[in-house]
Image (cartoon, rainbow, N blue to C red):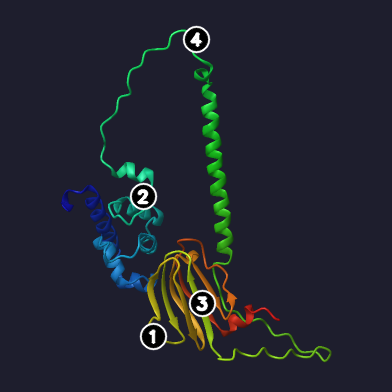
Amino acid sequence: MAENDPNHSELATFGEELRREREIRGISLKEIADATKISKRFLEAIERNDHKTLPAPVFTRGFVREYARYLGLNAEEMVSRYNYAAAGDDRIEQSAHLERLVQPATETRTPPVRDKPRGIPPPYARIDRNIYLLIAIAVALAGVTWWALRFKREARAEAVDTVHTTSAPAKPPTAATPKPAPKPAAADNLLHLTLTANENAWIKLKVDGDDHFTINDELKAGDHRTLDAHDRFFFDTIGNAGGIALTINGVPVPPLGGSGKVRHDVAFDRQWVTEHQTTP
């Protein structure tokens, strides 16, 4: 039964601890939902450990991270505890280390006793132990190099993390240089958005000034959407920004963040398209 499941007990403790920390600070779920743009329904599900209501784990981890940051807790530690606590959920991708922590202890296997070899051992049995030490060092260096390269890629992605629509200062006209003719608008006078999901991503999108969300759903890898707007597209939330590719009126949008990055309040309007279109 679920009451006897240690994973279930740990998971319950995880949700109760978050709720207790929030109540100690006198913070309501509505306040957290308004600040982090996370649905109050998902915040309640986290505190209840209701995985049927929560989206895929990659998004739930982002919710836990934002929730913990708002309370002033160690966000990465809480995400690690969520992974451990929710290890019984078959949607959680488990590492070999996590599986060893969760699985019950198995019977200790005693290696068979072998007779000691007599005489001089063959050459392959006389390998210096330093070779194993060198192999371990080489593996460690390879791991450090891999993490360094990954950090550089993420830092490069952070450089284009924020997309703003800014106005370039107009240059005063001179008598020798005539003003360039304004670029004609599209024939249908609309903004065309092409949205492609390369990885699973949660999208909350509004078109023009609508109060309701045109898209409020989890897109699966391979999903493709096209939308039109008169003035602008407003992304309230983009879960896993690195898994989304955007094109507006044929202009590719720079990457919005790395894999698993959660973005809020990202807008694209006509001025953005004008500034990023290539002059023929």
Q: Which residue is mark 3?
A: 194
Numbered label tally? 4
Q: What type is the residue that disc 3 sits on?
A: Thr
Q: CA distance from mark 3 to mark 1?
A: 21 Å
Q: What type is the residue that disc 1 sits on?
A: Asp
Query: Mark 2 against mark 1, which lies toward the viewer?
Result: 2
Q: Is residue 112 above or below residue 198?
A: above
Q: Residue at x 26, y 37 (%)?
A: 105
Q: What type is the residue that disc 2 sits on?
A: Gln
Query: Along the polypeptide, which appears first: circle 4 or circle 1?
Result: 4
Q: Position of residue 30 (x, y in %)?
A: 31, 73
Q: What type is the residue that disc 4 sits on?
A: Ile
| Side of 134 where 97 appears, left or right | left
Circle number at residue 120: 4
Foreground pick, 80 / 2: 2
Q: Which residue is mark 1?
A: 211
The crowd level at tag 2 (other Cα within 10 Å; few <14, some 14-19, many 20+) is some
Q: CA distance from mark 4 to mark 1?
A: 84 Å
| Side of 166 where 54 appears, left or right | left
Q: Residue at x 63, y 80 (%)?
A: 275
Quarter of the figure that contains the C terminus: bottom right
Query: Along the polypeptide, which appears first: circle 3 or circle 2?
Result: 2
Secondary structure of residue under mark 1: loop
The crowd level at tag 3 (other Cα within 10 Å; few <14, some 14-19, many 20+) is some
C-beta proximity under 8 Å, tags 3 and 2: no
| Side of 214 where 149 appears, left or right | right
Query: Mark 3 against mark 2, which lies toward the viewer?
Result: 3
Secondary structure of residue under mark 3: strand
Query: Mark 2 against mark 4, which lies toward the viewer?
Result: 4
Circle number at residue 94: 2
